[in-house]
Image: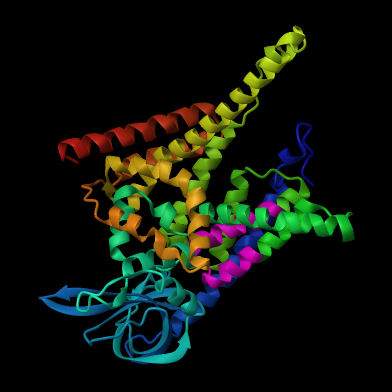
Amino acid sequence: MAQKSTRSPFDIPLFNQKQWNIALMVLAFMLCVRVGVDYALYQNLPFEEPGEIEALVISQYQKHKNAKPYWVLKLSSNTHTLYTTSKEDLKNLQGRKIRLYGKINSQKDCSFLQYFRSCFFVGFSISTLPQRESTAPIKAYIASQHTKQSANEHTSQATNTNHAGLFSALFLATPLPKAWRDVSNTLGLAHIFAISGFHLGIISFVLLVLLTPPYRALQRRYFSYRNEAYDLGAIVLILLFGYLVILDFAPSFLRAFVMAAVGFALYLSGLKLVSFSLLGLCALLCAIAFPNVAFNRGFILSVAGVFYIFVILRYMLEPSHKPDSTAQNLHANPAQDSTNNTAANYGAWARILLRVLWLHVGVFLMIMPVVHVFFPYFSPWQLVSIPVSMAFVVLFPLAIVLHIFGVGGTLDPWLDMVLRLEIESVDIITPWWFLCAYLGASVWAMFSRAGYYALLLLATGFYGVCLWAYGTGEI
């Protein structure tokens, strides 16, 4: 068993070395079994000889080649992603189950490793199936609240697909419309629009606020012996799991839920919560359950975001060893006690606000080199993401409440203003040599304050280079 800490019941390590060895062997065995199942599914794909597959249409968009339009369909089949195209005049199939007849040209075009990312399926014919997404009624309800004047008939209303798609993405993890995807890339708001641990935290807080009063009323009368934190935590996790099923196990939210579930189990056991070991264990569990998430950009950035939050919290929450002169002089002058207490309260709130602000600024800077591995867009306006992230704690529950009561369109005029913004950006890709140095500093920061400062220096330097490139137009 892990040795008990003398400092705090929540400082007990997750595993000792022997237990970690056993846990890793068990996880490796589980991963081999899961990969074996995926390999069997991969072998059953129609290579060279045509065959049928059933899939869910995740997104559908139009492209052009030689001035001729064609449709691109992003499909989910057995939790894996496939792409296909069609020159037919297709109706909107997003959210529909389809039967696709065709083939994958060869295993060279779709290797087993590529299968975990995405493969191209040459479709000969498409037929729709009667099944729809379970969230189709919810999407229709959201869309009904976002309308605009029809271009042909001034008296009629048409769905504002941009705004309907935005809230569908926020609530149901559907793909963002292109207009909002451009805004997300330019302003660095991907963590806002993609459901992740940020949203899970807000939803958990709102559920606790709503559930605590009735629970306490029942507890006082019927089960005063029960532990409130344990019971409400379990109820919230059950509700979050139901939401995860509705989202069809969206990768970033899956990581967040696994962390929440494992973290709750550690809380019950009195083990350390803010732990890099916890993050690594949760990432491994997600990869075992769904190996393709290891290649998902949203999942990778979600894990990276939590990692840098943990890095900042590690050094932000370190206890100070300086003597507390205020505590030593308490009651030295009774007439000043009230003034001292008031000043101490203001000082405590100021420290909390500064820490919250630094957490947002620090994560913004630290994750930027990782983000620019996948998304090249940079603009100084991305600093807007910091206050937007802080305000989103209020805006997200407000948007949910407005849509529940059927008045989600109230926010549309403000959203129109955002879409009308013309923000210039430059493309900057993180060099591999810098990424390797940065990841090395990230690992160093797990163990040393010097590594933490080195990480901050590199992150700030990278942001400075991005500003210089934006100002000069040079990369």
**424 displayed left or right of 247:** left
Q: In the rendered image, is residue 78 in sight?
A: no
Where 474 sits versus 31, above or below? above
Main SS category, magenta section: helix
Q: Residue furthest top?
A: 333
Q: Which residues are magenta?
A: 239-264
* Residue 351: image location, x then y, percent: 57, 27
Q: Nearer the viewer, residue 155 or 273?
A: 155
For the point 21% across and 47% down, which residue is it? 424
Magenta stretch: residue 260 in it?
Answer: yes
* Residue 29: image location, x then y, percent: 62, 65
Q: Which of the 4 image quadrants contains residue 158?
A: bottom left
Q: Residue furthest front?
A: 155
Q: Nearer the viewer, residue 341 or 123?
A: 341
Q: Nearer the viewer, residue 15 or 378?
A: 378
For the point 28% across and 56% down, which residue is it? 419
Q: Nearer the viewer, residue 261 or 401?
A: 401
